[in-house]
Image: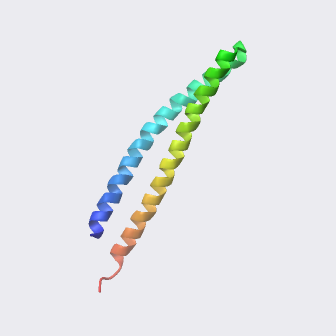
Amino acid sequence: MLQRRMASVSSRIREIQEELRIVDDQLSHLVDDADEKSLRALVSETPAAEFEHREARKHSDAMLRHRASLMGSLAELNAKMDELLDRMKEPTT
């Protein structure tokens, strides 16, 4: 039972780590895009450019929140794995 739970937690940790790699890559592009559109909005001073900048910033902010959520989930799973490992060390009666 304990080993199955550990395998499940371990699998979920790997999934989240892979998702984090993808999110980090996407986040890099979204932040670059938002920065570029911010500069464009400053230079052009048009409502359309400002709108594009706000939309790009919303997307990068949403991805940052998603990344923070994944990091929280990963921390919880690592704590759960530590707990399971501690239980495994306990002597059985």
- In percent of width and height, residue 34 lies at 60, 26
Where is residue 3? Give x, y as percent.
27, 66
Q: Is residue 38 left or right of residue 74?
A: right
Q: Is residue 47 above or below residue 73?
A: above
17 vs 62: above or below: below
Identified at 66% across, 23% down, the residue is 38
Tell me what residue is drawn at x 51 percent, y 53 percent: 72
What residue is at 29 percent from the left and 60 percent from the top?
7
Q: Is residue 64 above or below residue 1?
A: above
Q: Quadrant of the N terminus?
A: bottom left
In the figure, is residue 50 to the left or right of 63?
right
Q: How is the image coloured?
A: rainbow
- The percent position of residue 42, horizontal first and vertical second, equals 72, 19
Image quadrant where residue 91 sits: bottom left
Residue 40 visible to the viewer: no
Total numbered circles: 0
Q: Is residue 87 visible?
A: yes
Q: In the rendered view, does 46 fall on the left or right side of 91?
A: right
Q: Is residue 8 above or below residue 35?
A: below
Identified at 55% across, 43% down, the residue is 65
